[in-house]
Amino acid sequence: MRRLYAKVYLALLSSLALFALAAAVLWHTLGEEPGPRRSAQIAGRLAQNALPPASAPAAEQQAALEKLAAGIPGDISVFRADGTLLALRGAPIRENEKGIWRIRLADSRVLALRGERHGPPGRALVALALILLAVGAAAYPVVRRLTRRIERLQAAVDSLGAGDLSARVEVEGRDEVARLAASFNRAAGRIEELVAAHKWLLANTSHELRTPLARIRMALELGKPKSEIERDIAELDALIEEVLLASRLDALASLEVTEEVDLLALAAEEAARYDLEAQGEPFVLRGDPRLLRRLVRNLLENAQRHGAAPIEIRVQRGELRVCDAGPGVPSAERERVFEPFYSRHGVGLGLTLVRQIARRHGGEARCEGNCFYVTLPVEIQRPRST
C-alpha cells in the first residue's frame, strides 16, 4: 500500500516536472524563433538598398556584406540565383541547409541567415533537471514532516482502539492536522472519563447492592414482617433504576422526548407529595417531562433526608431553587456531592442524576450551602403565552 507521504511527494514532483517540460517547450517555441526571423527581415530590407549588383566583383560584394551585417547576430551568406556563393559573414551556410531563413532579393539573389547559436538544448534540460532535483530535495522533509504527524495520529487511534485509553497525540502547529489531533485528544479524554466513571459506578453499585440483599436474606431467615422485606426490595429496586437511568443519560446524545413543560407546575405537583408548596412564576421550556420530574423529586428527597424543615422550593427566571434549614454542605464538598455514591449521610445517585438531567437540558446544577440551584439557558426559555 502506497504511503500518504509518497503520494504527496510524487504529486509535487510530477507537477514540477510538468511545469519544467511546459517551460522548455514554450522557451523553444517562443524564445528562439522570433530572433532569426527578425534578423532575416532586417537583413533582407538592408540588402535591397546596400548590396552592390550581382555583377559586382566578389571583393566589393564581401565588403558591402560585412558593412551591412555589422552588429547583426548570426551567420549571413549571399547566393546567386543559380546557387553560387557571392559573399558570406561568419560560418558558411550550405545551399540546402535546414533551419535557415532565406529571403529572395529583387534581382533573384538569395540572402541566407542562420540565427545566433545558443548552445545545445541539452544544457537547458540539464539545468531544469537540476532545479527539479533541488526542489524535490527541499520538499521531501516538509512533506515527510506533515505525514509523520498523521502517522502518529493513526498510531494513537490504533492504541485507543486496542484498549489504551490513555493514548494521546502531541499537537504540533496550527493547521488542520493540529486541530484534528486536538479533537482526538478531547474525544479520547472524554472516552477515558466515561469508561472510568462506568467502572467506578459498577464497582460501587455491586457494593451497595449487597446491603439491601443482605437485609432481605436475613429477614427471610429470621421471619421478619413482610413490610420490612418490601421496604428493602423497594430500596433495591430504586437503586437499580437510578443506575440504569444514569447509564442511559451518559449514552444519550440528545433528549429522546421534548415537549413544552411548565417547570413551576411540575414543581408544584412534586412538592404536594411532600406537603410542600412551590412558589415563583411560570416558566415554560422544551424538555423531557419525565426527567425534569425526576430532577425535582430527587432534590426534594435530598432536602428531606439530609436537611431540616422548613424546605423551600422556588422557580424564577429559568432557575429552580430548593433550600432547607439544615447546616448545609461545606464548600469543600459542594462539587463532590454530585459524584455517584458520595454523601456524608448516605449513598445513592440522586444528586448525580440531578446534574446529568440538568446538563441534558442545556443547564447546570450547583450547590451553595443549604441550597441547590438548577439553571436553564436562555435559548430554551420561552414565556407562556397569555
Image: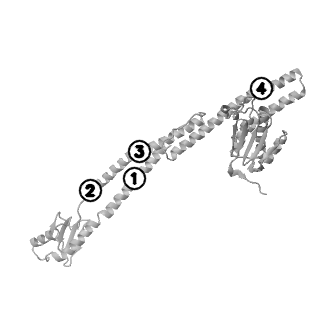
Residue furthest to the top in view is 222
Q: Say whether residue 87 is left or right of residue 239.
A: left
Label 1 secondary element: helix
Earlier along the polypeptide chain: callout 4 or callout 3?
3
Q: Of the residues shown, which amino acid type is indicated by label 4? A: Arg
Circle on res. 140 = 3
The residue tagged 1 is 16
Q: Give the x, y percent position of residue 69.
A: 17, 68
Q: Is residue 287 visible?
A: yes
Q: Who's the residue at 83% across and 40% down the image? A: 276
Q: Which amino acid, mark 3?
A: Tyr
Mark 1 neighbour class, 10 Å CA radius: few under 14, some 14 to 19, many 20 or more? some
The colour scheme of the drawn protein is one colour
4 or 1: tag closer to the N-terminus:
1
Q: Which amino acid lies under the numbered mark 1 shown in the image of this protein? A: Leu
Local crowd size for mark 2, using a 10 Å CA cut-off: few (<14), some (14–19), many (≥20): few
Distance of label 1 from label 3 (alpha carbons): 13 Å
Residue 248 visible in the displayed image: no
User: What's the distance in space between the residues labelled 4 and 3, CA to CA?
Assistant: 64 Å
- What's under tag 2, amino acid-wise? Pro
- Crowding around mark 4 (Cα neighbors within 10 Å: few <14, some 14 to 19, many 20+) is few
Question: Quick one: label 3 or label 2, which is nearer the N terminus?
Answer: 2
Marks 2 and 4, how far apart at CA:
95 Å
Q: Which mark is residue 210?
A: 4
Q: Quadrant of the C terminus?
A: bottom right
Q: Secondary structure at mark 3?
A: helix
Q: Which residue is mark 2?
A: 120
The x and y percentages for residue 9 are 44, 47
Question: Which circle, 4 or 1, is nearer the viewer?
Answer: 4
